[in-house]
Amino acid sequence: MNTVRAERKEDTVVSLPHAAPQQASAAHARGAFVPLLLGGLALLLMLGWQTVLLAGERSALLAGHASQQQTVDNAGTLRAQLDALAADTQRLADAGNPNAALLVAELKKRGITINPAANASAAGASAAGK
Amino acid sequence: MNRLQFSLATALGALCLLMAGTNVTLSSLNRGLQGDIATRQQYVQQSVQLEGLYREIIRALAELGARNNDQDVRALLQRHGISYTVNPPAAPVPAPGARK
């Protein structure tokens, strides 16, 4: 065992002075630029792909938002009509009309209360709520 | 690293930073838009339920107004663009063996 170690040690000692300067100079010549460039390019590629995906998602969301507009407008119109009708019915009931009062009472039984004042102040707000 | 390599690496890093910022912004904007769309969808779904209530109120008012000949209720509905007609009662069907 001692003989082998001695031989290896001897080999190392013999070979080092010739090989070390060459390896060091080669490493110095390559530098960190290529790995850095590769990593940067990979990161750039990944981020670019993510940007494309996010831009596509945004485009689809904007299209969906725009396609909703007509439905939302119709819903707003319907709510305004309901609010106006409910408020007028409540006013008629307050004025003593028995049919309107009966309807308001039936709605109240179902948990629906009408607030004409809220309807007058905020046109878009719901006056009839469960 | 020579001067050109340094410039190239710096430009690459700046581009990556810019794209990361863009992605964060886009992601945030998309999340906001998704929330907005969900809110509007909920608004529309609630309105569908309210449409049923609206029709019920109109039908009830029309029935009450027609049954009791209530002119105030008829006028109320007309103000909202709704009119109704009362069908005349059906004539009694003569008995099969009846003669004139």
Image (spheres, coloured by chain):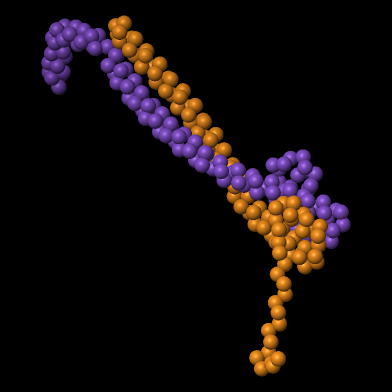
Q: Is residue A112 above or below residue A125?
A: below
Q: Nearer the viewer, residue A44 or B62?
A: B62
Q: Quadrant of the N terminus of chain A?
A: top left
> Which residue corresponds to the image point at 49% horizontal and 40% vertical from the top-left?
A64
Residue B97 location (% of width, % of height): 66, 94
Nearer to us in this view, A100 or B85: B85
Asked whether the viewer can see residue A114, the reply is no
Q: Position of residue B43 (x, y in %)?
A: 61, 45
Q: Which image quadrant for residue A68?
A: top right
- Name the side, left or right, on which A112 lies relative to B20: right
On screen, B29 above or below A94? above
In the image, residue B78 above or below residue A27: below
Residue at the (77%, 54%) spot, across then down? B76
Residue B88: x and y, percent? 72, 72
Which color was chain A given?
purple
Q: Is residue B34 left or right of residue A100?
A: left
Q: Colour of chain B?
A: orange
Could you tell me which residue is drawn at 68 percent across and 55 percent down? Answer: B54
Residue B95 is left or right of residue B12, and the answer is: right
Where is residue B51 drawn, in percent x and y? Answer: 64, 54
